Amino acid sequence: MKRALVGCLAALLLGLTACSTLTPWAAKVNGDLIPTAALDEELKAILANKTYLQQVEQANLDGGVTGAGDSTFTTSFVGRILTRQIFFALIGQEVERRDLEITVADEESASQEVSASFGDEETYKAFPEAYRQKLVSRQAQVTVLQAALADLKIDEAAVDKFYAENQAQFTETCVSHILVATPEEAAALKAQIAAGADFAAVAREKSTDPGSGANGGELGCVRPGSFVPEFETAMESLAPGQVSDPVQTQFGAHLILVTERRAQPLEEARAEIRQQLLTGGQADFEAFVDEALAKAEIEVNPRYGRFDRESAQPGIIPPDAPTPDSTQPTEPLPGDQVPGEPLPGEQAPPPGVPQGQPVPDQQPGG
């Protein structure tokens, strides 16, 4: 699917305080206005969230993010945000045309997806409440439309059925470990634990893993495929409460303690299940976005640039900016999804998608 976000080389700056002098609309989509106030609101929400703004700046987006003056953004970044609003306007228009209902369950699921997409819940909560609700509303519209386009019924009964039929997928192992340099050191520590020493106390004193040692070796509750194979195999062979023999990996020698095995609660898994059920509608949704974009009447206030729908990444090109090289894809904003693409831990609709599982070669506690 064509990516919605576009990167340009503009160096011009747009101050938020200047918006009041502009005409009242930033863009028109099939006759519907996107007011400058709506663009202003989103930019101010981003500007006020210092953690998120830092993440965006660290992404090294083409054209940059913040300007040289206080409370300013580059025209390239403003174009990215307005482009995203145009795409969501197209989605919202189709939801309205089809008279699709967005249920409480849809909004609750969208809220979980949006929050998870930022990785850190505190970063998400730092946005104003009104902006968080806007992000949730957008995500809910994407989900409902995607289901409708593919004639998928994704209600609570469908989620419950998937959960019941795929229990292995939602089994979690709660695990702790102690990491030391050699198997001999690990064996000596296991002897201490067998003699009555507390595993967590030994981990705090002896473990060289900075991520978990201070927490008594706790790595949390994880699903299969979270750690390197040697660690994973040993972990899966243990009964709850059992301490492993020394396990050698590329990181050192581990003592592994499984504290619990459990099924992830259904309520925690609902958002993920809904996304899995929606994968069957991915192609239909992408086709809709492309077709809607091709047919749409889109007018951009010249102050913000022009809309280019011919490149591989349709979007706004700021005033006086060169046409972007269509062979060079741009990266989504942190926490962002391009409508219709797979979820972020994965990167995929606008702010709002859960992080994926840890990579198989992740160091325990790293």
Image (spheres, helix red, strand yellow):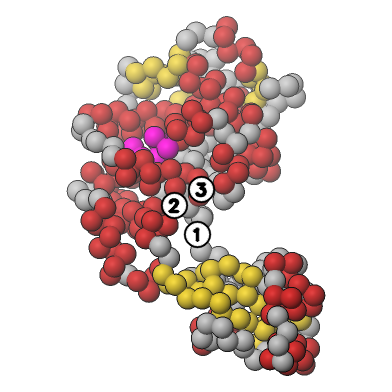
Number of the label disc, if any, that sits on residue 356: 1
Q: Which amino acid type is marked by label 3?
A: Ser
Residue 330 seen in the current view: no
First in residue order: circle 2 vs circle 3: 3
Residue 140, magenta (yes or no): yes
Q: Quadrant of residue 51?
A: top right
Is the Cβ of the residue at disc 1 closer than 8 Å to that at disc 2?
A: yes
Q: Quadrant of residue 234?
A: bottom right
Give the residues in magenta: 136-142
CA–CA distance in space, label 1 to label 2: 8 Å
Q: Is residue 348 above or below residue 72?
A: below
Closer to the camera in the image, 40 or 262: 262
* Residue designated by label 2: 343
**The residue tagged with tag 2: helix, strand or loop?**
loop
Q: Residue at x 70, y 67 (%)?
A: 215
Q: Residue at x 42, y 28 (%)?
A: 86
CA–CA distance in space, label 3 to label 1: 10 Å
Residue 189, magenta (yes or no): no
In-image side of 175 versus 293 (left or right)? right
Q: Residue pushed farthest front?
A: 196
Q: Which amino acid type is marked by label 2?
A: Leu
Q: Is residue 166 above or below residue 325?
A: below
Q: Residues within 10 Å of mark 1 (few under 14, many from 20)?
A: some
Q: Residue at x 22, y 29 (%)?
A: 97
Q: Which amino acid type is marked by label 1?
A: Gly
Is the Cβ of the residue at disc 2 closer than 8 Å to that at disc 3?
A: yes
Q: How many dots with numbers?
A: 3
Residue 197 x %, y %? 73, 84
